[in-house]
Image (cartoon, helix red, strand yellow):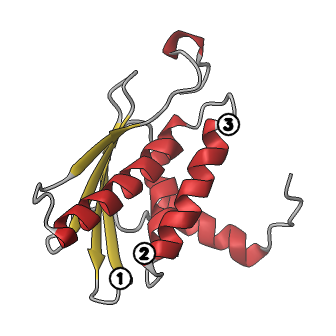
Amino acid sequence: MNNQKVTKEMEDKLVEHYQNPKNNKALKDYNARGVGRNPDNWGQVDMYLLIDENDILQDLGYIYKGCPTISFTASVFTEELKNVPLGDALYTTQLELDELNAKDNCDECIKMILVAFIAAHENYIQRKDGTNKEDYFYKEIETTLTYTQQSCG
């Protein structure tokens, strides 16, 4: 477990994301869109990406239906990925998703954000190579607990 001490600056930044979530919008100009859905409760995150010609994430947006923690978590996630190379963002997102999938926990809301980003990446690749011109790519999360066993919200 990471024993990093939370600084006042980090705490203030997290409070700001909680009180005033960033990027909670569908981008008007985007070149990739992914949908991540929880098949157990139909929660959903739509992730919009604007990627430049050098494969750098210029802007990200999201809209969601589901638990309120999505807004806070997606706010932090999307802000952290701005101006990051798409390949690096995909790599760290996939690592985090793999780690969450290996645990029995209630992180389905976080998984929807990560899966939506991975789906948007797939949509971007397909659009770029001409294999698919769909408006979005859809993925469902892997749930680790049956819905009736979950004690989280």
Residue 36 visible, this orientation:
yes
Residue behind mark 3 = 102
Q: Is residue 94 above or below residue 17?
A: above
**Residue at 61% in and 65% down:** 14
Residue behind mark 2 = 86
Do the CB atoms of the residues marked 3 and 2 lie less than 8 Å apart? no
Q: Is residue 33 left or right of residue 5?
A: left
Q: Amino acid at mark 1?
A: Asp
Q: Position of residue 102 (x, y in %)?
A: 67, 36
Specify which label sits upstream in the sequence, 1 or 2.
Answer: 1
Q: Position of residue 65 (x, y in %)?
A: 31, 39
Residue 65 visible, this orientation:
no
Q: Amino acid at mark 3?
A: Ala
Q: Residue furthest top?
A: 148
Q: Amino acid at mark 2?
A: Leu
Give the spatial CA distance, label 1 vs label 2: 6 Å
**Residue at 61% in and 56% down:** 95
Mark 2 lies on a secondary structure that is: helix
Q: Which labelled disc corresponds to residue 55?
A: 1
Q: Is residue 145 above or below residue 136?
A: above
Do the CB atoms of the residues marked 1 and 2 lie less than 8 Å apart? yes
Do the CB atoms of the residues marked 1 and 3 lie less than 8 Å apart? no
